[in-house]
Image (cartoon, rainbow, N blue to C red):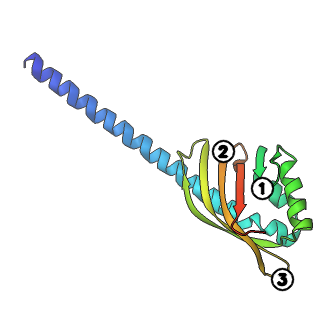
Amino acid sequence: MNIKNILSIAALVTTLFTSRNCLAQERRSNTSLEEAKKAIAESNRIYFEAFARNDSSIFINRYAKDCWIMPPNAPALRNADAPLQFFKTAYYKFGLRNGKFITLDVFGDGKEYVTEIGLWQSFDAHHKMFDNGKFLVLWKKTPDGWKMFRDSFSSDNNK
């Protein structure tokens, strides 16, 4: 066997191992992203229960301790007290009692952060939609699971 053959075999073996490793990493990343998507769907499913039940603890638990909530036409609410501040404003000032998220896409590697893009609808105590719009949420994986880290949204209505 000459040196060319040995180098060719070595290159082939290296390529096979590299490809195999890349495929394994891609599968792990896809699995991580799928797990994040499931956690986000579950969080979104119970998000509005907080308003239906007037239970801020459900709402607060959706967010990371170092979160930012960035509502339209208002300053950003930051850190651990932001979710409670937002809940009180939405519940008492705007009359939010239920809602709906429509996730359009979730992307990222699923390891530390993923981004969610979607639409939202807000309903009052009479089940009437009073506002709707779009959102962009950066989710963060914490020791307590996936939590909203940066939450930005805007209305589609001119009020």
Indicate the secondary structure of the residue bearing disc 3: loop
Viewer-side label of 2, 1:
1
Judge whether residue 8 can be spotted in this image.
yes
Q: Residue 126: which numbered mark, if any?
A: 3
Spatial CA distance of label 2 from label 1 is: 22 Å
Which residue does the numbered mark 2 point to in the structure image? 141
Q: Residue 93: which numbered mark, if any?
A: none
Residue 23 image offset from top left, x and y in percent: 37, 43
Write down the quadrant of residue 135 in the picture.
bottom right
Residue 63 image offset from top left, x and y in percent: 76, 51
The disc, 2 or 3, on the residue closer to the chain's N-terminal end is 3
Indicate the secondary structure of the residue bearing disc 1: loop
Does 67 sit left or right of 116 as displayed? Answer: right
Question: On screen, 123 above or below 38?
Answer: below
Q: Residue furthest top?
A: 3
Viewer-side label of 2, 3:
3
> Residue at the spot x=49%, y=45% of the render?
29
Residue 21 image offset from top left, x and y in percent: 37, 36
Amino acid type shown at disc 3: His
Quarter of the C terminus within the rendering: bottom right
Amino acid type shown at disc 1: Pro
Spatial CA distance of label 3 from label 1 is: 24 Å
Judge whether residue 64 can be spotted in this image.
no
Spatial CA distance of label 2 from label 3 is: 36 Å
Residue 34 image offset from top left, x and y in percent: 53, 55
Does 117 sit left or right of 88 as displayed? Answer: left
The disc, 2 or 1, on the residue closer to the chain's N-terminal end is 1
Amino acid type shown at disc 2: Lys
Which residue does the numbered mark 1 point to in the structure image? 71
The disc, 3 or 1, on the residue closer to the chain's N-terminal end is 1
> Residue at the spot x=60%, y=64% of the render?
103
